[in-house]
Image (tube, rainbow, N blue to C red):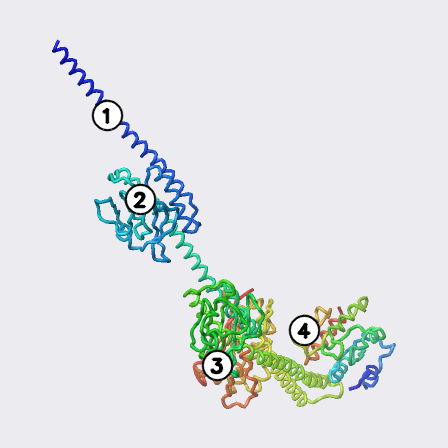
C-alpha cells in the first residue's frame, strides 16, 4: 500500500490527476483499503471526478485544495477515525455545502448513531451494492 | 316528815342515777366519737396514701420503691400507734427482704426465709395475740398482738404486710378492713412494678433479638471483599450485641499450629504484640480444642489463662469452624474494666454467630481465590468480544472486494460479457450474500451473549418486506424447482405495522432459506402473514424433511444443526434460528416449529404483538 496520499492519487491509472477543466462533481474518498478505493473509483469514475486518500491525516489540506462536492469516509482509519474526520469537516468547512457519506464495515446501531451525530448525511455498510452507492451519491449531490 | 325524807332520798337517788347515767352515756359517746374521729382520720390518711402511691414513679429501682411504700404507709399507721413492716420477696436471694423499724432500732433491712410466715406461703391472713393464739413461727418479740396480711394478686405473692401493737384487745373489724385496703393497695403497686419489670425485660429481650438478627444479617457483609472486611463486620456485630469492651478474632494457622490474633475491634487497651497460642493453650486455645464456648468472669484467675502481656477482667471465647469442622479460629469477647458473667443467651448468640462467621470467612477465602480467576475470565471474555468484532470486520473486508469487483465486471466497462459469464457473476454475488449473512450471524451471536441484541421498531410495510425477501430467494428456488408462494391476508393493515424492519428481514430470510435448504426438488415453500386483533402471525411452511418431535424444541438452540436429509446443501453456523428466536423475543413475541413428523414438512410460525 502506498504511503503518501498524493502518490496514491497520481499513481492510479484511472484517476488521471484531477484537472481544472473537469466540470464534473468532485467526490473525495478516504479509505485505508486500496481495494475499496479502487472499486469506488471504478464505479464512480465514469460520472464523477474522483479524488482518493488513504488516511485522514492531511484531510483539511486536501479539501482546501480540491473543495469536493461530496466526501466518502471509512470509519476505521489509522490515526484519526472517520467520525472525528466528519466532525472536523463539519466545523472547519461549515460554509461549504459538503455532505459526508460513510462507507464502512461498522454495522452496529451505535456506530450509525455516532455517524449521524458527527453530521453525516448518509451511511452505507460494506460489502455494498453498486446500486446503493450510486443512489446515495446521486441523492447527496442532488440535495 | 319521814315520808318527806324518804321521798327526798328517792329523788336524790334518782338524780344520782340520772346524773350517773348521763355521765356514763356521755362518756360512752365521747369514746365512740374519738374512735370515729380516729377512723375518719385514718381513712383520710389512707385516701391520701392511695393517691400518693399512684404518683410513685415506676422507673424507681425496686428497693427504693419498696422503701417509699413503707414510708408513706407510716403516715396512715403512726397515728393509730401501729408498728409496721413490709416483707417483700427478693427473687435474687430467695428470701423476704424486710423494710421497717424493729423495736429500739433504726430503719434496717433484714432478711427472712421465704417460708417463714404462713401469710406468705399460704396466702392467708395470720393473727397472733400474746398468750392466746397460735405461736408465730418467726417473730419472737414483745408486741401484744400482731397481724400478717399477704401481698398478692391471683397469680403471684409479692410478700407480706406485718402490723403490730402493744395492746392485746382484739382488732376492730373496721381496722381490719382498713388494713386489707392497705395491703391490696401495696400489692397493686408491687404488681404494677413487677409488670413494668417484665415489660422492660421483654423489651430488652426484643432489643437483643433484634441486634442478634441484624448481626446475623450483617455477618456476610464484606465477605465478597476481603477476609479483613468480613471479620471486621462480625466483630463489630459482637461488640454491639454483647456490649463487650473489645472483641478479637484469632486465626488458626494450620501450618504452624498456632492461634494468632488476626483482627481486633473496640477498645485497644494496652498495646501488646499479637498473641500466639498453641492448640489447647489459653482460654481461646481451650475453646478451640474442646469445640465449645469457654468463658470466665475473672479470666486472669482461670486455670486456662495464658499469662502474657494482656490484661482483662472477663473473657468469652467461641471457636469458629468451617462447614467441614476444620478449625478456622476463635472469637474472643473481652471486658477490660468491669467484670461480668456472660448470660446463657449471650453465649448462645455468640455460638450461633460463630457458625455464620465460619461460613462468611470461608466464603471470603473462596472469593479471594476466585476473584483472581474471575478477573482472568473477564479478560478472556473481553478478548473474545474484541476478537469477534475484529473477525467480523476483517471477514467483511474481502467480501467488499469480491462484491465490488463483481459489480465492476457487470458494468462491462472493460469489455462485454457473455450470458454464461453474467450468470456466473450472479452466482458469485449470491455466495457473497450468503457469506455476509454468516458474518452478521457471528456478530449477532456476540451481541446476544452480551444481551445487547436490541430491536428498534417503527412503522413498516410488512407485506412489501415479505415480498422482497421472497423475491431474493427466487433464483435459489428456481435452481431446485421449488414453488414459492406468498399469501397475505388483510394487505392494507399489514402495510403499516410497528416492527424492526431490518431485523424482520433477517428472520424471514433465515426461515425461507432454511425451508429451501430442507425441501427436495419440486417441493413448495409458502409464506403466510395475517393479523389477528392482538398479533401479527407470520409462518413459513415447506413440504420438506420435517422434524422429529425431539428436534422440534431444539432447533432454536445455538449451534444446533439438522443434517439436511440427502441434500448436501451449504451448512450454516447453526445460528440462524437461534438469532430468529432472539429477535422475535426482543419484539415481545414467540416462535414455534410445527411438524407432523419426518418427511412431512415443517411450519415455523412466529407471532408478534400487534402495534399499528
Residue density around tag 3, few if under 14, some if 14–19, many if 20 or more, within 10 Å: some
Residue B587 appears anywhere in the view: no
**Mark 3 — on which chain does it sit?**
B
Q: CA distance from mark 1 to mark 4?
A: 125 Å
Q: Is label 1 in a helix, a strand or a loop? A: helix
**Mark 2 — on which chain does it sit?**
B
Residue at the disc numbered 3 = B554
Provide residue A107's location: percent of width, then percent of height. 66, 76
- Of B212 and A122, nearer the camera is B212
Residue density around tag 1, few if under 14, some if 14–19, many if 20 or more, within 10 Å: few
Provide residue B118's location: percent of width, then percent of height. 26, 51
The numbered dot on residue B25 is: 1
Q: Is label 2 in a helix, a strand or a loop? A: strand
Residue density around tag 4, few if under 14, some if 14–19, many if 20 or more, within 10 Å: some
- Residue farthest toward the top in the current orientation of the protein: B1
- Of B107 and B539, nearer the camera is B107
Name above or below for residue B563 compared with residue B166: below
Asked if marks 4 and 2 touch (Cβ < 8 Å), the reply is: no
Nearer to us: label 1 or label 4? 1
- Of A131 and B558, nearer the camera is B558
**Mark 4 — on which chain does it sit?**
A
Quadrant that contains the N terminus of chain B = top left
Q: CA distance from mark 3 to mark 4?
A: 34 Å
Q: CA distance from mark 1 to mark 3?
A: 121 Å
Q: Quadrant of residue A84?
A: bottom right
Residue at the disc numbered 4 = A111
Residue B24 appears anywhere in the view: yes
Nearer to us: label 4 or label 2? 2
The numbered dot on residue B163 is: 2
Amino acid at each position: 500500500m502506498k504511503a503518501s496520499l498524493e502518490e496514491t492519487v497520481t499513481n492510479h491509472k484511472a484517476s488521471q490527476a484531477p484537472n481544472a477543466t473537469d466540470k464534473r462533481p468532485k467526490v473525495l474518498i478516504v479509505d485505508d483499503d486500496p481495494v475499496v478505493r479502487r472499486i469506488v473509483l471504478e464505479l464512480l469514475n465514469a460520472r464523477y471526478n474522483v479524488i482518493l486518500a488513504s488516511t485522514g491525516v492531511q484531510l483539511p489540506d486536501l479539501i482546501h485544495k480540491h473543495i469536493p462536492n461530496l466526501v466518502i469516509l471509512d470509519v476505521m482509519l489509522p490515526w484519526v477515525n472517520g467520525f472525528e474526520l466528519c466532525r472536523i469537516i463539519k466545523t472547519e468547512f461549515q460554509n461549504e455545502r459538503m455532505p459526508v457519506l460513510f462507507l464502512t464495515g461498522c454495522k452496529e446501531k451505535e456506530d450509525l448513531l455516532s455517524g449521524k451525530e458527527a453530521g453525516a448525511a448518509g451511511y452505507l455498510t460494506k460489502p455494498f451494492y453498486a446500486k446503493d452507492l450510486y443512489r446515495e451519491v446521486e441523492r447527496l449531490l442532488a440535495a | 316528815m319521814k315520808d318527806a325524807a324518804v321521798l327526798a332520798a328517792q329523788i336524790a337517788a334518782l338524780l344520782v342515777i340520772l346524773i350517773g347515767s348521763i355521765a356514763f352515756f356521755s362518756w360512752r359517746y365521747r369514746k365512740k366519737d374519738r374512735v370515729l374521729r380516729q377512723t375518719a382520720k385514718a381513712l383520710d390518711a389512707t385516701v391520701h396514701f392511695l393517691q400518693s402511691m399512684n404518683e410513685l414513679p415506676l422507673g424507681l429501682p425496686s428497693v427504693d420503691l419498696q422503701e417509699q411504700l413503707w414510708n408513706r404507709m407510716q403516715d396512715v399507721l403512726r397515728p393509730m400507734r401501729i408498728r409496721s413492716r413490709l416483707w417483700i420477696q427478693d427473687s435474687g436471694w430467695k428470701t423476704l427482704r424486710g423494710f421497717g423499724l424493729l423495736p429500739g432500732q433504726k430503719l434496717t433491712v433484714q432478711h427472712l426465709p421465704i417460708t417463714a410466715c404462713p401469710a406468705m406461703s399460704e396466702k392467708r391472713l395470720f393473727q397472733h395475740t400474746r398468750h392466746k393464739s397460735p405461736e408465730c413461727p418467726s417473730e419472737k418479740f414483745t408486741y401484744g398482738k400482731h397481724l400478717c396480711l399477704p401481698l398478692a394478686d391471683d397469680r403471684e405473692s409479692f410478700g407480706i404486710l406485718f402490723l403490730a401493737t402493744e395492746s392485746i384487745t382484739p382488732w376492730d373489724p373496721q381496722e381490719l378492713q382498713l388494713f386489707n385496703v392497705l395491703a391490696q393497695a401495696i400489692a397493686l403497686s408491687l404488681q404494677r412494678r413487677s409488670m413494668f419489670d417484665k415489660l422492660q425485660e421483654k423489651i430488652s429481650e426484643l432489643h437483643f433479638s433484634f441486634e442478634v438478627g441484624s448481626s446475623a444479617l450483617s455477618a456476610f457483609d464484606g465477605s465478597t471483599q476481603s477476609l479483613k472486611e468480613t471479620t471486621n463486620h462480625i466483630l463489630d456485630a459482637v461488640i454491639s450485641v454483647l456490649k463487650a469492651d473489645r472483641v478479637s478474632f484469632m486465626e488458626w494457622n494450620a501450618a504452624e499450629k498456632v492461634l494468632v490474633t488476626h483482627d481486633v475491634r473496640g477498645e485497644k487497651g494496652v498495646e501488646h504484640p499479637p498473641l500466639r497460642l498453641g492448640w489447647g493453650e489459653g482460654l481461646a486455645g481451650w475453646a478451640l480444642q474442646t469445640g465449645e464456648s469457654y468463658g470466665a468472669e475473672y479470666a486472669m484467675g482461670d486455670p486456662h489463662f495464658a499469662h502474657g502481656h494482656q490484661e482483662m477482667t472477663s473473657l468469652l471465647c467461641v471457636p469458629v469452624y468451617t462447614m467441614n469442622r476444620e478449625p478456622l479460629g476463635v472469637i474472643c469477647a473481652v471486658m477490660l474494666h468491669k467484670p461480668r458473667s456472660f448470660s446463657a443467651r449471650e453465649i448462645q448468640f455468640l455460638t450461633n454467630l460463630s457458625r455464620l462467621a465460619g461460613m462468611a470467612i470461608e466464603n471470603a477465602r473462596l472469593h479471594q481465590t476466585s476473584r483472581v480467576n474471575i478477573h482472568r475470565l473477564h479478560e478472556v471474555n473481553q478478548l473474545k468480544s474484541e476478537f469477534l468484532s475484529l473477525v467480523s470486520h476483517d471477514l467483511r473486508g474481502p467480501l467488499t472486494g469480491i462484491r465490488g469487483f463483481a459489480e465492476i465486471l457487470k458494468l462491462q466497462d472493460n469489455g462485454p460479457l457473455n450470458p454464461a459469464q453474467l450468470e456466473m457473476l450472479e452466482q458469485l454475488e449470491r455466495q457473497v450474500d450468503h457469506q455476509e449473512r454468516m458474518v452478521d450471524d457471528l456478530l449477532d451471536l456476540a451481541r446476544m451473549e452480551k444481551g445487547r441484541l436490541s430491536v428498534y421498531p417503527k412503522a413498516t410495510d410488512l407485506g412489501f418486506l415479505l415480498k422482497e425477501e421472497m423475491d431474493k430467494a427466487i433464483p435459489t428456488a428456481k435452481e431446485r424447482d421449488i414453488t414459492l408462494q406468498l399469501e397475505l391476508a388483510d394487505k392494507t393493515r399489514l402495510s403499516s405495522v410497528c416492527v424492526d424492519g431490518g431485523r424482520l428481514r433477517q428472520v424471514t430470510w433465515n426461515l425461507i432459506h432454511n425451508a429451501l435448504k430442507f425441501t427436495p426438488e419440486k417441493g413448495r415453500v409458502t409464506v403466510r402473514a395475517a393479523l389477528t386483533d392482538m398479533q401479527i402471525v407470520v409462518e413459513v411452511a415447506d413440504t420438506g424433511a420435517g422434524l422429529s418431535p425431539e428436534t422440534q424444541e431444539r432447533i432454536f438452540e445455538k449451534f444446533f444443526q439438522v443434517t439436511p436429509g440427502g441434500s448436501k446443501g451449504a451448512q450454516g453456523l447453526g445460528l440462524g434460528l437461534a438469532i430468529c428466536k432472539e429477535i422475535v423475543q426482543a419484539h415481545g413475541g414467540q416462535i414455534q416449529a410445527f411438524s407432523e413428523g419426518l418427511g412431512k414438512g415443517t411450519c415455523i410460525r412466529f407471532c408478534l404483538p400487534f402495534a399499528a
